[in-house]
Image: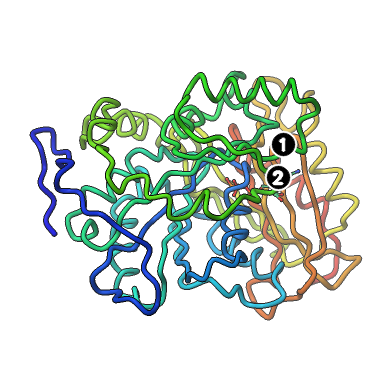
Amino acid sequence: MAVTLDTHGDPCPSAISTCEVSTHEESHKTKPVPATIITGCLGAGKTTLVHYILRADHGMKIAVVMNEFGEEQGLEKDMLFQQQEETLFSLGEWVELANGCLCCSVKDDFLRALEALMEQRRTFDYILIETTGLADPGPVAASLWTDVELHSSICLDSIITVVDAHNLQKQLFQHSPCEEAERQIAYADVILLNKVDMVKTTTDLSAVETMIKAVNSEAVILHTQYSQVDIKAVLDRGVYRDAVWSERWSEEGDVHEGNSAAGVRQSKGEATQPDGAEFSDAGHVRHGGHSHTDRAGITTLTLRTDLRIDLERFKRWMEDLLWDEGDRGGGGATRSEIYRIKGIVGVTSSDRPHLVQAVRDLYDITEAPYGPSVDPALNQSRVVLIGRILDPLALHAGFKQCQDGSHL
Ligand SMILES: Nc1nc2c(ncn2[C@@H]2O[C@H](COP(=O)(O)OP(=O)(O)OP(=O)(O)O)[C@@H](O)[C@H]2O)c(=O)[nH]1
């Protein structure tokens, strides 16, 4: 179906097709496949939600499109499969998009990936699109509508924003806010107010809810722990089935190419740090530098080693990174700000890989229950740091001090 565009380039409401969830028995050729966008700040619980949906008993095969920062590529999938005893029964396809945020620099890749995915449409009934924590969901949603080819085969179902109840206040108001937190809330049809277990009092929780409502009073707000939610609340909501969506987005000025706030911010943030630095440390720490520089100056740095990690030293290093407010790693004003850490590390005390997670000041290191994986890539420890003012030399040096002499 061709999309009729109005004078602003927005599809006319009358041109929007309806969609229903298809099943294997029904024709995959004719019905558009519903797609839900899952967005939310770094570490809010988006992947936890994707995993939860993949394990749930909804009878659908799900294709997952995951947008990660370049050097994170493969890590989420490895972490997922380290934690699952069996293949996830509802996983249809898994697509990863790296090297940027799909709301801006990988938008073309995103559309191409969706087109390629649709060639496999018999293998799934539903699409989940997980954005990076820094994505603006507006352009992502808009591109699902404005791509003529895709529009006939995929229909946007809803936008789910996962909010970290423990960190929202910092993300919205502190000196280094998650720039997109507000937009992600603004676009949400459903907000999972997640990590409620980490909020001490009901008064604190109400305050967080008030902050959300100040940005978006229309969205359905659901309180969750580990993103556990009634599946019907997040899949096949059909929010955009009859939605007059163009009014909403044209008012916010996001759909027009070359005129969007996202486009302006994208150019501002490029190359704020030197890229591609290669580090060699007796052949063990093999790669450094970073790949993606975010619009807000947020970068990623991947640390790798094929030496085993001393867990106690590693924990101390993490605590220094996450908790030390003092003069560490370059000192004073240039101190790194770490928002998110993910990793898989081989440790001296166990043959199983350990999964590392940190969100701002909280971290968690757990032994993988079903490892070690046969994946040769896991003969290497990988720790991905996402933050601002990352100092590669200081961080590599700190990571090196956690390493033991023995190889993985
Ligand atoms: N205490 C607590 N921890 C949670 C909850 N939900 C998720 N987590 C933990 O928070 C960490 C981050 O969760 P993820 O699902 O990876 O977050 P994400 O939004 O996908 O993170 P990015 O992809 O980096 O933006 C993990 O260690 C989760 O186990 C929750 O409700 N309570």
Q: Which residue lies at the image location 40% right of the left edge and 40% below the top edge?
A: 137
Front position in the image: 372 or 385: 372
Badge 2 marks a residue whose secondary structure is loop
Residue 328, percent across and down? 77, 29
Please, what secondary structure does the residue beneath circle 1 have? helix
Mark 1: give few (<14), some (14-19) or many (20+) Cα within 10 Å. many
Whether the residue under disc 2 has CB within 8 Å of ligand 1: yes
Residue 311 location, x and y as percent?
87, 55
If the image is split into quadrants, where does the C terminus sit? bottom right
User: Residue beneath label 2, please?
Assistant: 225
Q: Residues within 10 Å of mark 2 (few under 14, many from 20)?
A: some
Residue nearest the observer in this picture, 189 or 184: 189
294 left or right, relative to 330:
left
Q: Are marks 2 and 1 in contact (CB under 8 Å)?
A: yes
The amino acid on which the numbered mark 1 sits, given as a three-letter code, is: Val
Q: Which label is found at residue 196?
A: 1
Asked which colour scheme the image uses, the reply is rainbow
- Residue type at mark 2: give it: Gln
Q: Is residue 346 left or right of residue 221?
A: right
Seen in the image, is 112 located left or right of residue 378?
left
Quadrant of the drawing holding the N terminus: bottom left
